[in-house]
Image (cartoon, rainbow, N blue to C red):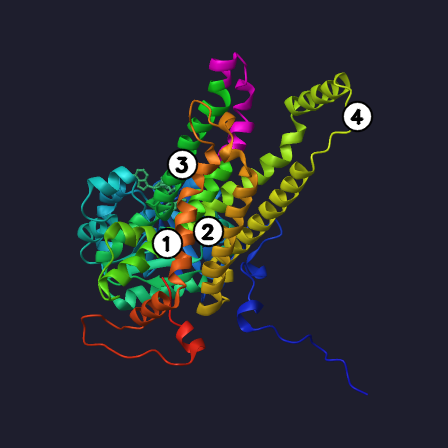
């Protein structure tokens, strides 16, 4: 008979350690005294960042001493395990001191130069956008120039006071660290690790400006795609407004302005989603055409094409966003009052015309197919969006990723095209649809996607696809690298694609 183990299976060492060790937490949930042998760390400043940092350091097993200009006033705001004292006393014993004050107050610390000599100063400051443009030297380099006998390390500026307090599991875990002395960088990296963060070595202090610019960035990769999506939205919205609202008002004296918030938005969103999706695949087509024309892949693409290729993921995600909104708006259409009145009016008209059974077989089929294709296109787009998440993308190998993004993406484009065509049906050929002589919106949206689909079909022709595959494996028309493709078709297909 097997015995029950006396103790449960031991957890791995890392998981075993609580983020805030229990013996450090008092019954009033403030942090209690830490053991004397714990490494001592100093903090200059008693603001938001200093308080959160002190809490995290104490919770990670460090002894903390905070230097304030007015320790009496601020002591109550810190965990009881942290010692809060005057600046001079706080910097006397620790070897590592965090400077949690703003750049403009660095010079007020110069009176501490003698006590700070030979110590490591950790600069955690973040400049504002204006300060970043105004000063050519980073805050950390400025601090180093004020304290030439100290070693300045830039770290923790990308971590907010909130993340420090809540613990790394609730926020950004990476901490870029730079400084001129590898030993000092290592010491600060070890502290970051002990606090549960992931140190990223950024090299010398010359990188501090780059590290300080990190928190100032506002979704840089999304700027152009978002502007593109907004631009398309405005253009299509204006076009639909002219056709669906202005034309009935001017030519038929009908007030259709109620369509502005829902109807016109809902006819605009699919146009934007569809055109954006085609713009994900157009740069790949242009790149392939360029490679075919040049007969080599060893020539740089023009900058605009390079940027376009790099922004395909964001453009695709915005396309998915617009398509998802279109689906939501479509669900809401029957909830509108206008829709109910239209239905009732239609029913009354039927009764007055003495028609009992309204059923147009062609319309029924068109709508069934149209809806089904729309749902399929949205489903495929959702797959693309999910696989572009880093955690999912990292679990796929290159072939799986390119299959989903390239092949399934193209399927989504074809499904969207069929969805648009079934929406249009015969409308493109009806004169009444050309309001103000403007063609129906869906005919305009078909332009780019159809070019992409036709070009992709052209690239599938054996003579072109073989040449493209050879170029992508390094063959050059006028160059020295010449070889034939493997006869094994499957191997030839493994050639990477743009
Ligand atoms: P804060 O709340 O305003 O605290 C600044 C502290 O600086 C004051 O509490 C003050 O403490 C001290 N100080 C020292 N000399 C000073 C002087 N001459 N005049 C005024 N104050 C002086 O600011 P914070 O939010 O903690 O930010 C501190 C630093 O951390 C900044 O460089 C900031 O960029 C950086 N940071 C903050 C965060 C955040 O989320 N808050 C995130 C990343 C980085 P005493 O009065 O006790 O001396």
Mark 1 residue crowding within 10 angstroms, few (<14) / some (14–19) / many (20+): many
Disc number placed over residue 164 in the picture, else none: 2
Eye-nearest disc, 4 or 1: 4
Single out the mark in the foreground, 4 or 3: 4
User: Mark 2 and mark 1 in contact (Cβ < 8 Å)?
Assistant: yes
- The residue at which mark 4 appears reads as 356
Label 1, on which residue?
156
SS state under label 4 = loop
| Disc on res. 232 | 3
Task: Confirm if mark 1 falls within 8 A of ligand 1.
Answer: yes
Residue farthest right in this picture: 1
Residue at point 46%, 59% (across, down):
405
Q: Which residues are magenta?
A: 248-268
Q: CA distance from mark 4 to mark 3?
A: 44 Å
Above or below — where is 428 with respect to 455?
Answer: above
Q: As drawn, which residue projects farthest toward the bottom?
A: 1
Residue 170 seen in the figure:
no
């Amino acid at each position: 008979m097997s015995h029950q183990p006396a103790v449960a299976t031991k957890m791995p060492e890392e998981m075993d350690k609580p983020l805030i060790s229990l013996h450090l937490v008092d019954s009033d949930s403030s942090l209690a005294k830490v053991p004397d042998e714990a490494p001592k760390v100093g903090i200059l400043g008693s603001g938001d960042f200093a308080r959160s940092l002190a809490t995290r350091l104490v919770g990670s097993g460090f002894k903390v001493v905070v230097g304030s200009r007015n320790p009496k006033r601020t002591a109550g705001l810190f965990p009881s395990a942290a010692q809060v004292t005057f600046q001079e006393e706080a910097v006397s014993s620790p070897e590592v001191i965090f400077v949690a004050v703003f750049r403009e107050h660095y010079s007020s610390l110069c009176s501490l130069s003698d006590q700070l000599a030979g110590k490591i100063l950790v600069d955690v400051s973040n400049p504002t956008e204006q300060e970043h443009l105004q000063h050519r030297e980073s805050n950390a380099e400025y601090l180093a120039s004020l304290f030439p006998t100290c070693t300045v390390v830039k770290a923790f500026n990308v971590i907010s006071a909130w993340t420090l307090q809540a613990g790394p599991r609730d926020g950004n875990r990476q901490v870029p660290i730079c400084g001129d002395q590898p030993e000092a960088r290592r010491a600060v990296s070890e502290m970051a690790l002990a606090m549960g963060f992931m140190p990223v070595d950024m090299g010398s202090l010359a990188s501090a400006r780059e590290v300080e610019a990190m928190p100032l960035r506002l979704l840089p990769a999304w700027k152009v795609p978002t502007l593109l999506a907004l631009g398309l939205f405005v253009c299509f919205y204006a076009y639909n407004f002219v056709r669906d609202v202005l034309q009935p008002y001017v030519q038929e004296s009908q007030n259709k302005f109620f369509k502005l918030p829902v109807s016109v938005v809902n006819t605009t969103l699919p146009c934007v989603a569809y055109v954006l999706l085609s713009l994900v695949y157009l740069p790949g087509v242009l790149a392939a055409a360029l490679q075919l024309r040049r007969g080599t892949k060893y020539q740089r693409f023009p900058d605009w094409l390079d940027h376009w290729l790099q922004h395909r993921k964001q453009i695709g995600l915005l396309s998915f966003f617009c398509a998802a909104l279109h689906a939501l708006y479509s669900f809401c259409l029957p909830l509108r009052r206008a829709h109910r009145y239209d239905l009732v009016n239609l029913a009354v008209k039927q009764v007055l015309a003495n028609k009992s059974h309204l059923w147009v077989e062609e319309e029924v089929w068109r709508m069934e197919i149209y809806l089904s294709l729309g749902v399929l296109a949205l489903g495929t787009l959702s797959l693309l969006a999910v696989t572009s998440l880093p955690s999912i993308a990292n679990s796929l190998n290159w072939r799986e990723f390119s299959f989903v993004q390239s092949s399934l993406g193209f399927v989504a484009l074809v499904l969207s095209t069929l969805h648009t065509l079934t929406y249009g049906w015969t409308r493109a050929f009806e004169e009444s649809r050309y309001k103000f002589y403007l063609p129906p919106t869906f005919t305009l949206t078909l332009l780019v996607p159809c070019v992409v689909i036709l070009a992709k079909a052209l690239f599938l022709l054996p003579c072109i696809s073989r040449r493209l595959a050879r170029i992508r494996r390094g063959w050059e028309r006028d160059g020295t690298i010449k070889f034939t493709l493997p006869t094994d078709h499957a191997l030839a297909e493994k050639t990477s694609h743009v």
